[in-house]
Image (cartoon, grey):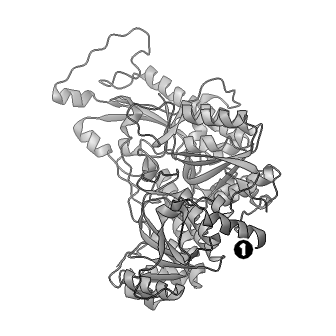
Amino acid sequence: MSKLLFPSHFNALNRQTYSFLLSSKSSLSSLPLRSKFLSKPSIFRSFSIPPNFSTTASKDEEDSNKAEGLSSNSSPPVIEDRPRSKDGDYPSGEFEFEEITGWRSFVVKLRMLFAFPWERVRKGSVLSMKLRGQIFEQLRGRFSSGLSLPQICENFIKAAYDPRVSGIYLQIEPLNCGWGKVEEIRRHIINFKKSGKFIVGYIPVCGEKEYYLGSACGELYAPPSAYVGLYGLAVQASFLGGVFEKIGIQPQIERIGKYKSAGDQLSRKSISKENFVMLTSLLENIYGNWLDMISSTQGKRRDDIENFINEGIYRVERLKEEGWIKDLHYDDEVMSMLKERVGQPKDKQLLTVDYRKYSRVRNWTLGLGQGKDQIAIIRASGSISRVRSPLSVPGSGIIGEQFIEKIRTIRDSKKYKAVIIRIDSPGGDALASDLMWREIKLLSASIPVIASMSDVAASGGYYMAMAAGTIVAENLTLTGSIGVVTGKFCLNKLYERIGLNKEIISRGRFAELLVAEQRPFRPDEAELFAKSARNAYRQFRDKAAFSRSMTVDQMEEVAQGRVWTGNDAASLGLVDAIGGMSRAIAIAKQKANIPQDSQVTS
């Protein structure tokens, strides 16, 4: 089973490991390829595509030369006549708060009066939400652990319109998610403030991501003993080449695309120039965005923000002195302040409704999302596989068969005006990716299909997205990674040391290509292995060029296995627009000829 291998520094079981996106100071470690990639202990395989896709590529040898000749400059390449992002051609999807009045207000009050018991909220309540740990892209059941991004965002919108909710108390704990999700939540915090209601943030542990969200609240508190670690962002990569050399393991790696660094951590002892360039570019993008957004929020110069961070901020008092937070208060003191603000007696507990209960309040009850036009939203997150493994947990990844069934159901239905595919995936099985690409392409021929990228849509994740008519990404979404890596472990020295002997009887010149780990490749086997990898890369690259209306040469410049931020990808033509789900919905309305001010059901 072949794989769309994603970059080594982002390559574990799911989107969690896709970077320093997950923790501002966590390492971007180059971990060994996960075991699911191993069809046999000695082999890990490459991306490949079924051979029925015709290409316009040049000869294998010329392809290989191209793969080795791409500039290692960290700046995005500039090419004449490249298809540019048409961001300005699309509606912004910016939230505009419009108070519910008149007849609609009466209907909403009537619905709330006869609402289900679990939908009832006392007037004057404060919505209490605690953001902590991992945030999932999928909807979560009421008994599921973890937070759901769709439910978090929906709660912000509902609370803005709900006359029973006075404001929001947002407690921000250490987060374990990517910057794409952080940006989406920050956008909803800012949108909620347009309702005129208050939102108070509380941040007991202050890192870069936590402050990035908290600063959007406008009113931010921390306990006097808060942990503060605003030191900047860092990336690190680990390499096992020296370890394998000592124990007698020789990784034989074939990679096409000089930035496709999966395999580097197995074969190298130090970082490659190309990997260093790519990681440095990603880090500069993320850190630069952080500085820009904080300086805008604080109303200070970017240089002043950077100088402040470079002092090494570990005392919470410094944040108060510099105006980064409003004051130092314990949680109970903040709650007392909120009671006074909403006019509740001091001797009573603050009226609150928590995130999980409020998630059960339907949009219908509040008069939201009642449009006659329907837009389907398909959420695809995690590693890609073609069929469900007996050991896989439901909802743990993208199962090709199930995804295709959903796509076909929508295609056969006549009730949907458009489809949004929300992608949060670092890649996975190549065949599954190609089959899903085909089904998305067929669907887009009948109704508008918009791809919305979350934290990661790289390699197989990008493969899915490029079948859509329009691609929307966050500024810091990680995407691209159009490349191939494959290889095997040669264990002959290890076997000698431990006294293991393996004999193979075979028929066919190349029958032992993927099973003979007790010896290195023969010259003819190595040549075949390299040709297979180049062919796989050529097909992947050419299909990407076809999907994005580029020439092969144009796609070659931005492929090579390189990972881009959404912002860079937009300037290179890999992405069409920058934004989150709200913008994807606005574009879907535009493509489906639905008025922008009309509500839709999704």
Q: Is residue 231 left or right of residue 399?
A: left
Sort mark 1 into few (<14), some (14-19) or many (20+) by Cα contacts within 10 Å.
few
Q: Is residue 32 left or right of residue 106?
A: left
Please report the residue visible at 47 percent of the width from the left and 85 percent of the height from the top: 339
Depth check, front residue: 8 or 437: 437
Q: Is residue 483 left or right of residue 32?
A: right
SS at badge 1: loop
Q: Is residue 212 above or below residue 78?
A: below
- What's the amino acid at mark 1? Glu
Q: Which residue matches tag 1?
A: 99
Please report the residue visible at 38 percent of the width from the left and 82 percent of the height from the top: 332
Q: Position of residue 71 (x, y in %)?
A: 59, 51
- The image quadrant that residue 582 belongs to is bottom right
Depth check, front residue: 481 or 444: 444
Q: Position of residue 496 (x, y in %)?
A: 20, 27
Please report the residue visible at 61 percent of the width from the left and 31 percent of the height from the top: 435
- The image quadrant that residue 113 belongs to is bottom right
Depth check, front residue: 387 or 114: 114
Q: Position of residue 304 (x, y in %)?
A: 52, 84
- Identity of the residue furthest to the top in this view: 507
Can residue 186 be seen from the camera position used here? yes
Q: Position of residue 591 (x, y in %)?
A: 79, 50
Q: How many marks?
A: 1
Can residue 83 be seen from the camera position used here? no
- Identity of the residue furthest to the bottom in this view: 321
